[in-house]
Image (cartoon, helix red, strand yellow):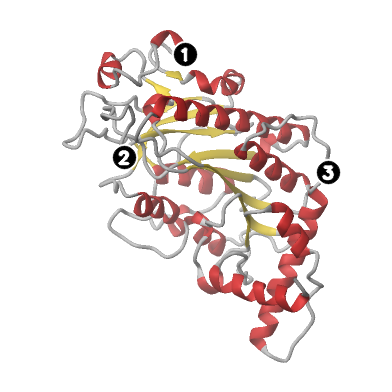
């Protein structure tokens, strides 16, 4: 790829959203983007009931005669709730008070389509409205990330920008690292932007300059520091290592998005789900270790999310179908660990056999925006939601 081709790809990225342009906005002095947000998407819809287990509820085993986790295998969190044993790598963080387990996360009139429901989560919309911008795109338009940061956000292992998508002229400066090494090699081919007589070309050149600056930081991160943390040899472990390198570069980024694929467990769930949870827990434990090495764990907030949960009753294929409310994790050095939300109401299933939700997912977003970054939530979330009391002062 020569410089002309790279400029062409930069122009394409501007229109398709792979690397997005940024325009200066008024400064919000109270906003603190030195605090890092890491989103972890559990793609496909994680089974919350076999993740955070109501082991003392007899209806749990009754609804799942083949896939329920045996009571004596559950990692107890309290007298009625525990974790799947595959999540054992999270127990040291739980005991240190650095994991908030939020139960019953969902939204009104839940949509059970993968595509539509993740769109609702990404845009923080109602189930009946269609929005073009991601919730973090609106947040960054309201209070821009400092221009000195290499990028607003980095998406690792996927081209899907999710909460950073859309925005038009006020789009985020988001880099999608589907292949880290390939990106670094291509970025090195771009020279610093010059000037052109055409306004549109000047804009593309500025986008190219953003790419160069961001890539320079990532190049510096590609081999240093040499973490003593041992990263799992899994897809998520590799993404965690890349995320740690990006943060360690010191080039500046407000948010990162990682993914774990494969949670759409319609059949033969037990083996698949166990492996996915193990991969998630070991990756998160490695992330904590690596960020602690570079002194960033206390100013990092990690939040898991998925498009929906699974139905309480197992299906005929020893799996679970699309459901509503689920459990999610919030981790970090300033997290006030514990159980939040309400335990699964297995005695109050709706006509489709799904559970009611007790925590609106936008309450978690409000926690990020208001309590973590210091933003007014009414713009990004298009309304007021109740932040959770899960962060220490």
Q: Is residue 298 above or below residue 127?
A: above
Cα–Cα gap, marks 1 and 3: 38 Å
* Farthest residue, direction top: 72
Give the mark nearer the N terminus: 1 vs 3: 1
Q: Residues within 10 Å of mark 1 (few under 14, many from 20)?
A: some
Q: Is residue 345 above or below residue 255?
A: above
Q: Is residue 115 above or below residue 228?
A: below
- For residue 322, the mark is 2
Occupied quadrant, residue 284: top right
Residue 105: x and y in percent read 38, 37
Give the mark nearer the N terminus: 2 vs 1: 1
Secondary structure state at the residue bearing disc 1: strand
Q: How many marks?
A: 3
Nearer to the camera, 384 or 50 = 50
Q: What residue is rendered at 77% in x and 84% in y?
A: 195
330 lies left or right of 222: left
| Residue linked to disc 1 | 76
Cα–Cα gap, marks 2 and 1: 26 Å
Q: What residue is rendered at 60% in x and 22% in y?
A: 89
| Residue linked to disc 3 | 224
In front: label 2 or label 1: 2
Q: Is residue 370 something that shows in the picture?
A: yes
Marks 1 and 2: in contact by CB < 8 Å? no
Residue 291: x and y in percent read 71, 36
Secondary structure state at the residue bearing disc 2: loop
Q: Residues within 10 Å of mark 3 (few under 14, many from 20)?
A: few
* Farthest residue, direction bottom: 197
User: Quarter of the image containing the C terminus?
Assistant: top right
Q: Is residue 149 something that shows in the picture?
A: no
In front: label 1 or label 3: 3
């Amino acid at each position: 790829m020569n410089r002309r081709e790279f400029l062409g790809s930069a122009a394409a990225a501007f229109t398709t959203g792979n690397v997005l342009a940024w325009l200066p906005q008024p400064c919000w002095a109270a906003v603190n983007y030195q605090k890092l947000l890491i989103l972890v998407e559990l793609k496909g819809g994680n089974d919350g009931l076999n993740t955070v287990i109501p082991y003392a509820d007899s209806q749990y085993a009754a609804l799942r005669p083949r896939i329920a986790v045996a009571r004596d295998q559950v990692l107890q969190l309290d007298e009625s709730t525990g974790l799947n044993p595959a999540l054992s790598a999270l127990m040291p963080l739980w005991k240190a008070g650095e994991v908030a387990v939020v139960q019953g996360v969902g939204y009104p009139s839940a949509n059970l389509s993968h595509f539509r429901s993740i769109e609702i989560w990404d845009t923080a919309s109602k189930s009946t409205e269609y929005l073009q911008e991601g919730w973090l795109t609106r947040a960054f338009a309201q209070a821009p990330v400092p221009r000195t940061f290499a990028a607003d956000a980095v998406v690792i292992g996927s081209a899907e920008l999710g909460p950073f998508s859309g925005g038009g002229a006020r789009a985020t400066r988001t880099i999608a690292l589907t292949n880290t090494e390939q990106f670094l090699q291509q970025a090195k081919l771009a020279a610093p932007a010059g000037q052109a007589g055409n306004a549109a070309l000047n804009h593309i050149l500025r986008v190219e300059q953003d790419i160069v600056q961001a890539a320079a930081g990532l190049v510096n991160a590609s081999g240093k520091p040499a973490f003593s943390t041992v990263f799992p040899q899994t897809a998520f472990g590799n993404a965690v290592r890349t995320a740690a390198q990006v943060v360690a570069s010191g080039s500046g980024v407000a948010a990162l998005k990682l993914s774990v694929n494969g949670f759409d467990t319609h059949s033969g769930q037990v083996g698949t789900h166990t492996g996915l949870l193990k991969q998630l827990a070991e990756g998160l434990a490695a992330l904590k270790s690596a960020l602690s090495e570079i002194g960033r764990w206390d100013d990092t907030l990690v939040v898991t999310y998925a498009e929906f949960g699974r139905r309480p009753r197992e299906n005929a294929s020893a799996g679970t179908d699309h459901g509503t409310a689920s459990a999610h994790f919030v981790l970090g050095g300033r997290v006030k660990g514990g159980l939040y939300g309400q335990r699964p109401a297995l005695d109050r299933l709706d006509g489709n056999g799904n559970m009611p939700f007790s925590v609106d997912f936008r309450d978690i977003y409000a926690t990020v925006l208001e309590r973590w970054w210091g933003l007014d939530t009414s713009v990004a979330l298009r309304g007021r939601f109740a932040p959770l009391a899960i962060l220490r002062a």
